[in-house]
Image: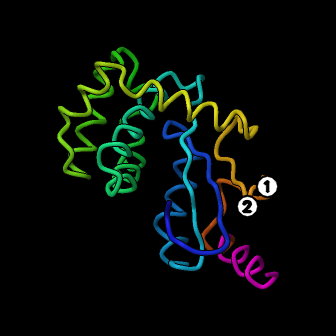
Amino acid sequence: MLGHGFPTFEVFLDLSCPFSVTAFNTLHDDVEPANRGRASFVVHNVVQPWHAHSTVMHEVALAVLQEAPAGYFAFYRQACGAFDDFAEAAVRGETRLQTGARLAAIAERSTGLPAAAINALLDKHAMAQALKWTCRHHRARGVHVTPTVFLHGLEATAISSSWTAAEWNALLAEVRAAQ
């Protein structure tokens, strides 16, 4: 979770989706710091099968969350920053484990968690159950594309991936005023 406070947003993101990357960067870099202690942003992983490498990206993210939870958002931000290195054309021809190893290196740099530990989890398919729960969760909520945002449990369809920090802050002010 980014931040602590009211209101609470659930943000469903796919690390392999450029629109999700834009939304995460805006929330992480601008909105959350400006609203620290006055809003919460719960980030949920969403695997989208039309991005062939989405599964391994989220396996690594979930491995980081499991093994080094304090470093999760540092990894997530670094993975978003390396988006072009993991775009469809960049991973074409790589095996799942090769892509995972490159992501594990990012995790090691951003969290200190040894890349070998993540690679071992990927090699053993150890994140499969966590990935299943993640997929069941977003399917049960009716999330099919990313980013999708919920405000207090209801889908906030007006929110767009292209929203600026100013638009987010205006919504936050409106929600706070209504309480």
- Using the image as rendered, state which of residue 54 and residue 2 is in the foreground: 2
Residue type of the residue flagged with mark 1: Leu
Q: Which residue is rendered at x = 73% and y = 81% of the image? A: 176
Residue type of the residue flagged with mark 2: Leu
Marks 1/2: CA–CA distance: 5 Å
Is the Cβ of the residue at disc 1 closer than 8 Å to that at disc 2? yes
Q: Is residue 179 above or below residue 25?
A: below
Does the magenta segment cover residue 170? yes
- Using the image as rendered, state which of residue 121 and residue 93 is in the foreground: 121
Q: Which residue is rendered at x = 54% and y = 41% of the image? A: 45
Quadrant in which the C terminus is drawn: bottom right
Image coordinates for residue 83, horizontal then vertical, percent? 42, 42
Q: Name the residue under label 2.
A: 151
Q: Is mark 1 on a helix, strand or loop?
A: strand
- Using the image as rendered, state which of residue 119 and residue 88 is in the foreground: 119
Q: Is mark 2 on a helix, strand or loop?
A: strand
Q: Which residue is rendered at x = 23% and y = 25% of the image? A: 120
Does the magenta segment cover residue 48? no
What kind of secondary structure does the magenta stretch mostly adopt?
helix
Image coordinates for residue 174, horizontal then vertical, percent? 77, 79
